[in-house]
Image: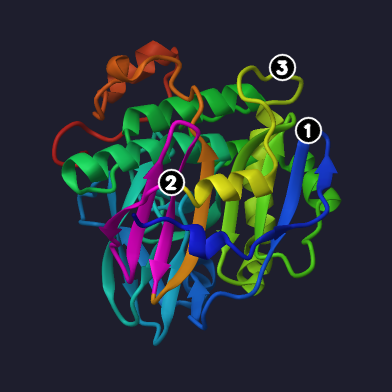
Amino acid sequence: MQTLAFHVKDIEAGEPLAHANLVLVPLRGPRQGRLEYRLAAEALEAGTLKVTEASEGGRVPELRAASTDPGLILILDGEELVGAKQNRILNTSVLLAPKSETLLPVSCVEAGRWRYVAPEFKAGGMSPSHLRARKSRDVNLNLRARGRAESNQGAVWDEVAAHLADVGAASPTMAMRDAVVERGDSIAQYLAALPLPEGARGVFVAINDRFVAIDLLDRAETLARLWPRLVTGYAMDALARLGRKEPGLAPKGPQAILERLGQIPCERHPSPGVGEDWRFEAEDLVGQALVAEGVCVHLSVFPNEAIFGRGEADRPEPHLEPPSRRRRRRGGSGGRGPRPGGDTL
């Protein structure tokens, strides 16, 4: 039985940082391996990575990443890419090979736009943990059933719409990014109150005293470069849950979660890039890890709680609802969403 026990056995929790309803506990441990890479946001800015639509017409669940970089490039689960025909987020973490072209599995987080605003994508932020948790479980199901790292796109759109409503943000194209823009002052308060913990290479996240996520990297330098964007994603989730009484799971600490994680068997799938995509799901935890050359490059863990609000048998099959019906159901006009047919799943 393959588990992540080896990759989390030396991780120790530090003193928590807190602001409002958000608590971050630093996770420290020795660096894993000597794998070298740069982050996608850095490569996009340097011009050694270009991300475009997969074809001229575009396909919602795929983007094309072309690297001219001589080294590896890491792009994270839940990381947002902004531009082209509509904004997307990564369905899983991917390590791009040097000087390569890779099709990236993605989900749309801007339901009301299907037109070019730029030929290429630029780096955005990180998704809220609740959206990443929902997406993670659906990707697990689709990898198991069809060998494809696809989400339930309709569910992702529903999560984005609910998030915009929860934080009180307006968006003509139902874009997740607009919530970050509109709540920028509140996010800045979280960022100021939650500085990077020295030496940490991961973080345990709790909102309203309940575990919501763990992100663990292979080394502290990577977390330092990601910290503002990761905290922005956590803060967006916290803002959506301010004043909410949370039912369900009792609070759990980071050591208990990590110990439990080491007991859950993983399913290993080929990654779109370098390494393997390790997926796991139990009644209490769900998530994924990118493992390459014996190194756990990025691990993300979420509570497998009542995300869907119904039993497994009642869950909808992954599909795309026609944009016109989706707009009518939400009562908004928005813009034109992705067209049914060749441009979608």
Residue 86 appears anywhere in the view: no
> Which sits earlier in the primary sequence, circle 3 or circle 1?
1
Q: Residues within 10 Å of mark 3 (few under 14, many from 20)?
A: few
Q: Is 87 displayed left or right of 196 in the figure?
A: left
Q: Position of residue 217 (x, y in %)?
A: 57, 64
Q: Which of the 4 image quadrants contains residue 28?
A: bottom right
Judge whether 262 appears above or below 235 on screen: below
Query: Which numbered tag is attached to residue 245?
Result: 3
Residue at image location 54% in from the left, 30% down from the top: 171
Residue lying at the far bottom in this picture: please name it: 70
Judge whether 339 appears above or below 232 on screen: above
Examine the residues drawn in magenta and state their main secondary structure: strand
Q: Which residue is mark 2?
A: 264
Q: Secondary structure at mark 3?
A: loop
Q: Quadrant of the N terminus?
A: bottom left
Look at the image and say whether residue 268 sits in the magenta stretch: yes
> Which sits earlier in the primary sequence, circle 3 or circle 2?
3
Closer to the camera, 231 or 271? 271
Q: Secondary structure at mark 2?
A: loop
